[in-house]
Every structure is written in structure tokens, then in C-alpha cells.
């Protein structure tokens, strides 16, 4: 689930109420420091039985010393009181002791307005005065206030140092009731205290709804292949028409602002829901494989609706600050694109509270109903700082870089956490964001880790550039990048040490390699595969030995080749009869190209020796032939001699 934007209704209600209130001494102003006000306020919220009814019983005890009755001079007294009532109040009646009192509504904007009640006598020091005020709210729609026959949301407020607020709601189980306590403890009867007669107290936020009294209608979807529906309470048709227009106009703009097309489920359901269901937030968005559900409070504004719609793209993020920050950023930019002709109300960014919340520590979603002040402060800081940080990033790297990162993350696997997003943003923008990351995202304890990160990323960038320039295999830098992307910087730095040492060794041998390549090419041979494999495998430590062995083998081959290719006379050809120096050289070539340098050298020497010793071999062969002839002659002579000795003629 992804709850979104906080409701700060207590602050809104109290602020407007304080502006509306005025305790009026006459005929000239006097302070109300000594006025004691006690009130009992009853809110009857049973839409099935009629309009909302509010009843005040007020007791005024004048302890203001400026209003002491005098025989002469300027006389101060109280003759009226302004009570805070909810906008939409109708049928106002005020009475004191059975007599009707004049009452009039003040003008102005806001959920709460002043109802001026005129007394039927003057109040001097020591006097007390009691009166009642009753009014109905048949229907109303304003910030933090909505009254229909099927849904009511209102702030239950009171006035004075001592007050009691009671709330009556339907007993029928078809109605859902939520009393969110304010400053007066638990209800349904709230005992409130204040420091002055002028102070308005928020007893509770009251929500009464009839979930079964809802209407569902389709929305013409601007997203291809996606069905969108809207569920709303009866009598909210005008609001529903406006929200449909907002949805149709905003989704294409959001798709463009995020930088990638909508890739969520094929169905989107938007529904008015009670605050208890949406955990006390103004909106809640959740998605599964089949559908996205957007729940909005009936008193939500366009800013919140746009924020929730923007969450249709935020599932690419694993961290809450990324999802909320982009939803706010995109919602405000969308509102600026659509303009006031479509977007109603204020589109202000989230308010800050000065809390130095590091965004990666912003916790998971929890219910805001009955949340503590500290919990509300953390939520407020999270929404504010996530938006402001993304605005800072936009100013630093540009919206295009943010969009490029979003598009890349949408194509990747899994959701992006803070580390993955920031790494991708640095890659896309080519800028170092160390200062911003340390200040906004991670706690101070991350400083050593971030220092390792910067060192590893910078060294890898330099290594990758050198590897590309040398045409070396990029697998080792890519393996190091995997360690850096996983934020395993100790492992990455150790691998960088090894890779940089290897690269240094390679560069020192680069001249020798170049000379060897040229010599091998001139000799008409293929470059040794063992050396190529050593270079490709970054086995640079053994490269010097391999080059030396290859040079020795090549020298032996070149010497043998030259000797074998020399013109030979008859005498040498006779000496080479039955010998194959070319075969030996072929075996030397095979050995050289496969990296068997010892065998290549041995075969080259054998070929050389065959040719070099051809003359001696010819002489030996001649001597052998002559020896054979002599032996034959001697044998023949011996036979003749032997025959003669026996008397043959």
C-alpha cells in the first residue's frame, strides 16, 4: 500500500477559527483577559434522520476589571460574543432566558465562520450571562467540511476555557462512523480545556458515511488498453464530473513527465472512501497484478487527486521518499500544465517543519489516525523533504536526466532503492552528487561508505576509459561495476587494486607486444594464442615470460626459415635426401601459434640443423657408398684369389 498526502485538518480548522473569533466589548475595545467562558456543544450527525444539527450552551462570566461599572468617565462592557460555526450553517437561532437574540454570520472564506450573537443586556464586571445557539447544516462542501445525505465529514469544535463536546451518530450498522480525537481525549463525549475565552479547541474530526450508497461510473480512459472506473457517494455528481475531467486531462501529461509509458495493471479503480479505510490520509493508492485502487477522501482537493494519480507510475521505486517525492513533483508539474481551467484550488508544495529527516530513514506507511505529534512531524518532514530534494536534483541535473533514469528503471528488474536510483542518476547525468546525497538521503554514519563509493566509482571510470582506449576485454571492469552497483565497495576496491596493477603491467609491456606483433606478422605467422588469451583474461603477470619465450621461439624460427629457404647445391640436396626440414618448420609454426614455444624452438632448431648439416650428411653418405664399393671390390678380389689358390684358371 502507498498512502500519500497528509491531512492537516486540525491546523486548518484552528487557524481559520482563530481568525473568525472576536469577543467584543463596547463601546470601545477592552481586553478579554478576565472573561471566563464555559460551553457545552452537541453535534447531532444522523443524516438518515435529517440535517446535521449543532447546539451550543454558553455561560459567560465577566471577570474583566476594565468593565467595572462607573458613574462617570468611559464605560466598558460586553454586549455580544462571536461563536465559531461551520460554513453552511442555516436556521441560526440564539436565545437567552426564553428570549430570542439577534445573530448574524460574518463574511469570509474558510471552513469556520463567526456567528455574532448580540446580548439583550450589557455585561459589567462580575456579571454572568447564559445563552444558546442552534443551527443546521443541510449540505456543505468546503476544505475539511462535507455534508451530504450519505457522507458527513466535519471538525467538532468548541470555545472557552472549559467546554464539553458530545457527538451523536447513527446506530444503524449500515453507517460507518469514525471519531478521530483532537485535543480533548477520547469521545464520544469530549472534555476540553483552553487557556483563554478566545481559544477554539478541536475536539474531534467526525466522519459518518454510508458505503452502500455509492455509484460507479466508467471514465473514458486516455491510456491504451486500460479501463478506469470512478465510485462516489450519491449527491456528489458535480464532484465526480470534475474528477473525471481531471483524470482524462492529467494522465497523458503525467506519462510524459515521468519519461516512460504506463505499464501497470489493465484496470484502475478510483473511489471515495472514509478516512479510517485510508488510514487517516487524504488518499491511498495500492496496486496488484490485476488492478490499481485509488482511494480518496471525499474532502480531498485536486492536489491530492493528482498526487494519487501520479502514483500509478511510482511502483518502480522501492523507497517511500522516491515514490512520494516523484508523485508530488509530477502532480505539481501536471497542475501547471493543465492550468486553473481544469485544476481547482491551491497547488502548493508540501509544508516543511524543519525536521532534518534523512530520506532513506523515512519509515513505512502507518496509520495517522491517533498518531502522536512526533509521528505526524516525521510524516510531514518526509513529504516535504522528498519533494524538495527532487526539485534540487531537477535543478542540478535537469528533468531530462530524471526522466532517463525513470525510463531505465522501468525497463530493469525489480524496484529501485535509494542506492540504485542515485547511481543511475549519476550515470545518466555524468555529475557527482556526493554533497546532495550525504545531506538529504543517508545518515551521517554513511559518510565513510559514501567516501568509498566515490573512490570506487571514480577509479572505475578511469579504468574503463583506459581499457576502452587499449581495446582490452571489458569483463573485469564490468565485474567490478557489479560490486559497486551492489554497494560492496571493499570488494570493489580490492578488485580495482588488482585490475589497475594488471593494467600497469600491460602498459609497461605494450611496446614489447607491439614489436612482437610486427615481427610475427613479418614472419608470416599467427600471433600466439596463449598470449592473446593472457591479454583477454587479464593475466598480465605471466605476460612478460610469455613474450620472452615467444621472442626466443620466433628468433629460432626466423633463423631456420632463412636457412631452409637458401639455395642448395647438389651436394646439399644429396645430404637432405630422406630428411624433411619443411615439416619440422611446419611443426614449429604450429607450436608457436598455439603457445608451445619450447616445442616450436626445438623444431626450428631441428630444421636448421637438417639444412646446416646437409654437406656433412652428403659426405657421410658418399663415404658409406665408397666403403660399400671398396668392400664389394675386396670381396670380389678375395673370391678370385681364393679360386686361384684352388687351381681354377
Image: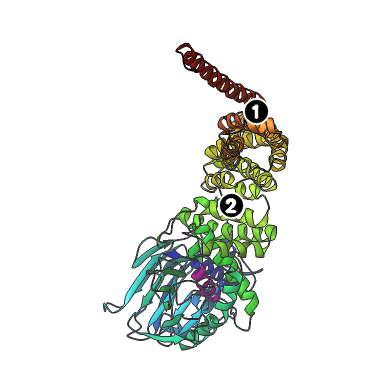
Task: Give whichever of 63, 108 is nearer the camera.
Answer: 108
Q: What residue is disc 1 on?
A: 614
Q: Magenta segment, which residues? A: 297-313
Q: What residue is disc 2 on?
A: 423
Q: Is residue 294 left or right of residue 48?
A: right
Task: Give whichever of 297, 623 is nearer the camera.
Answer: 623
Is residue 464 inside the magenta stretch? no
Image spot of residue 244 (x, y percent): 50, 84
Q: Is residue 633 visible?
A: yes
Seen in the picture, residue 438 relative to 561 is either above or below; the reply is below
Image spot of residue 137 (x, y percent): 44, 83
Q: Can residue 236 be seen in this view?
A: no
Task: Give whichever of 482, 472 is nearer the camera.
Answer: 472
Q: Which mark is residue 224?
A: none
Image spot of residue 346 (x, y percent): 60, 74
Name the image quarter holding residue 546.
top right
Label 1, secondary structure: give it.
Answer: helix
Are discs 1 and 2 less than 8 Å apart at CB? no
Amino acid at each position: 500500500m502507498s498512502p500519500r498526502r497528509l491531512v492537516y485538518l486540525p491546523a486548518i480548522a484552528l487557524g481559520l477559527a482563530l481568525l473568525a473569533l472576536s469577543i467584543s466589548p463596547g463601546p470601545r475595545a477592552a481586553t478579554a483577559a478576565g472573561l471566563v467562558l464555559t460551553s457545552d456543544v452537541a453535534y447531532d450527525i444522523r443524516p438518515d434522520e435529517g440535517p446535521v444539527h449543532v447546539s451550543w450552551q454558553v455561560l459567560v462570566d465577566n471577570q474583566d476589571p476594565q468593565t467595572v461599572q462607573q458613574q462617570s468617565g468611559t464605560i466598558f462592557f460586553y454586549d455580544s460574543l462571536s461563536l465559531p460555526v461551520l460554513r453552511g450553517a442555516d436556521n441560526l437561532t440564539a436565545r437567552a432566558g426564553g428570549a430570542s437574540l439577534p445573530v448574524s454570520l460574518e463574511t469570509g472564506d474558510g471552513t469556520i465562520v463567526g456567528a455574532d450573537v448580540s446580548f439583550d443586556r450589557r455585561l459589567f464586571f462580575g456579571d454572568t450571562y447564559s445563552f444558546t445557539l442552534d443551527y443546521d447544516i443541510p449540505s456543505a462542501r468546503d476544505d475539511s467540511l462535507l455534508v451530504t445525505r450519505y457522507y458527513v465529514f466535519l471538525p467538532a469544535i468548541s470555545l472557552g476555557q472549559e467546554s464539553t463536546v458530545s457527538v451523536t451518530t447513527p446506530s444503524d450498522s449500515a453507517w460507518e462512523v469514525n471519531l478521530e480525537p483532537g485535543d480533548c481525549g477520547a469521545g464520544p463525549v469530549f472534555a476540553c480545556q483552553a487557556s483563554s475565552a478566545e481559544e477554539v479547541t478541536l475536539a474531534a474530526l467526525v466522519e459518518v458515511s454510508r458505503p452502500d450508497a455509492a455509484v460507479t461510473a466508467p471514465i473514458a480512459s486516455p491510456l491504451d488498453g486500460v479501463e478506469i472506473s470512478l465510485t462516489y457517494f450519491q449527491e456528489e455528481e458535480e464532484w465526480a464530473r470534475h474528477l473525471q475531467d481531471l483524470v482524462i486531462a492529467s494522465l497523458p501529461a503525467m506519462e510524459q513527465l515521468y519519461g516512460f509509458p504506463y505499464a501497470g495493471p489493465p484496470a484502475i479503480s478510483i473511489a471515495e472512501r472514509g478516512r479510517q479505510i485510508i488510514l487517516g490520509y487524504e488518499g491511498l493508492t495500492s496496486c496488484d497484478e490485476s488492478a490499481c485502487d485509488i482511494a480518496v477522501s471525499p474532502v480531498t482537493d485536486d492536489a491530492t487527486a493528482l498526487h494519487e494519480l501520479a502514483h500509478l507510475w511510482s511502483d518502480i521505486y522501492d523507497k517511500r521518499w522516491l515514490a512520494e517525492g516523484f508523485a508530488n513533483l509530477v502532480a505539481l508539474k501536471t497542475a501547471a500544465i493543465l492550468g486553473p481551467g481544469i485544476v481547482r484550488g491551491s497547488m502548493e508544495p508540501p509544508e516543511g517543519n524543519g525536521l532534518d529527516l534523512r530520506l532513506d530513514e523515512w519509515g513505512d506507511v502507518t496509520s495517522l489516525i491517533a498518531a502522536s505529534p512526533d509521528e505526524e512531524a516525521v510524516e510531514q518532514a518526509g513529504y516535504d523533504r522528498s519533494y524538495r530534494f527532487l526539485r534540487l536534483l531537477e535543478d542540478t541535473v535537469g528533468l531530462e536526466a530524471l526522466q532517463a533514469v525513470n525510463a531505465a528503471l522501468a525497463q530493469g528488474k525489480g524496484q529501485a532503492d535509494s542506492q540504485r536510483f542515485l547511481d543511475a542518476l549519476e550515470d545518466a547525468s555524468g555529475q557527482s552528487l556526493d554533497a546532495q546525497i550525504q545531506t538529504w538521503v543517508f545518515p551521517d554514519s554513511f559518510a565513510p561508505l559514501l567516501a568509498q563509493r566515490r573512490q570506487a566509482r571514480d577509479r572505475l571510470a578511469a579504468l574503463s576509459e583506459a581499457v576502452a582506449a587499449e581495446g582490452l576485454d571489458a569483463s573485469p571492469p564490468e565485474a567490478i561495476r557489479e560490486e559497486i552497483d551492489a554497494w560492496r565497495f571493499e570488494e570493489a576496491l580490492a578488485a580495482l587494486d588488482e585490475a589497475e596493477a594488471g593494467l600497469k603491467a600491460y602498459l609497461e609491456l605494450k611496446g614489447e607486444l607491439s614489436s612482437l606483433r610486427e615481427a610475427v606478422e613479418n614472419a608470416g605467422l599467427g600471433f600466439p594464442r596463449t598470449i592473446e588469451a593472457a591479454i583477454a583474461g587479464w593475466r598480465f603477470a605471466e605476460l612478460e615470460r610469455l613474450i620472452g619465450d615467444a621472442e626466443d621461439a620466433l628468433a629460432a624460427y626466423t633463423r631456420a626459415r632463412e636457412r631452409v629457404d637458401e639455395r642448395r647445391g647438389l651436394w646439399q640436396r644429396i645430404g637432405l635426401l630422406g630428411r624433411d626440414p619443411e615439416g619440422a618448420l611446419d611443426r614449429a609454426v604450429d607450436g608457436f601459434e598455439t603457445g608451445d614455444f619450447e616445442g616450436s624452438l626445438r623444431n626450428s632448431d631441428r630444421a636448421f640443423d637438417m639444412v646446416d648439416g646437409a654437406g656433412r650428411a652428403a659426405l657421410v653418405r658418399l663415404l658409406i657408398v665408397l666403403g660399400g664399393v671398396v668392400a664389394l671390390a675386396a670381396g670380389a678380389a678375395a673370391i678370385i684369389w681364393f679360386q686361384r689358390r684352388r687351381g681354377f684358371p
